[in-house]
Amino acid sequence: MLQDARAVLLLNLSLSLFMTGVIWYVQIAQYPLFHQVGREQFPSYHAAHTTLTTTVVALPMLAELGAAALLVVARPASVSAGLAWLLLGLVVFIFAVTALVSVPLHSQLAVSGYDSPTVSRLVTTNWLRTLAWTARSAVLVGLALQGASLCS
């Protein structure tokens, strides 16, 4: 059972680190570049961005949600129940921001085309997901390092 709990922690860490890398790329490069595309090219660029990004993140995000729920159920002894719930809560928060903020802004851009204030709102509000994934990864790295020191 102990090995399984460590595997759940490692799965959470791996998925969170992957998504943290993706979200930082989106935050620093991808979304700000929307301002540089140009009005005429924006609809096709945005459509491609949305399709390709969904292809990259959909499965890892769903897997992370499942892994976070599994961590609540099958957690190592070194992870408190409260911390496991916090880590799951961060994923739920990320999903909520995605569904309630990011997706509607992308939908608005898909319908209206390039709109500087909407792109700026997308960049600004995406900090919520960026910081949540970063915090989740930091906690999981700390737990993994704590577990590594406990094993040596």
Image (cartoon, grey):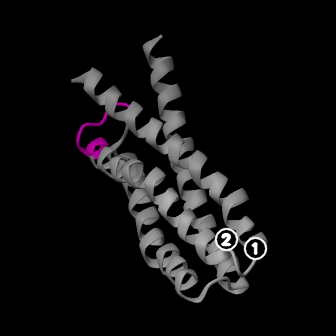
Query: Can you say whether 68 is above or below 127 in the image?
Result: above
Q: Would residue 68 be found to the left or right of residue 111 on screen?
A: left
Image coordinates for residue 42, horizontal then vertical, percent: 66, 75
Tell me, yes or no, whether the highlighted magenta stretch contains residue 40. no
> In which quadrant of the rendered view does residue 9 lie?
top left
Image coordinates for residue 105, horizontal then vertical, percent: 54, 80
Q: Would residue 48 be found to the left or right of residue 72 on screen?
A: right
Question: Element at badge 2?
Answer: helix
The residue identified by callout 1 is 35
Image coordinates for residue 39, horizontal then vertical, percent: 72, 81
Gap between marks 2 and 1 measured at Cα? 10 Å
In magenta, the rendered stretch is 70-78
The residue identified by callout 2 is 123
Few, some or many residues within 10 Å of mark 2 (<14, 14–19, 20+): some
**Closer mark to the observer between disc 2 and disc 1:** 1
Name the residue rendered at 49%, 39% in the picture: 140
Mark 2–mark 1 CB contact (< 8 Å)? no
**Which sits earlier in the primary sequence, circle 2 or circle 1?**
1
**Quarter containing the N terminus:** top left
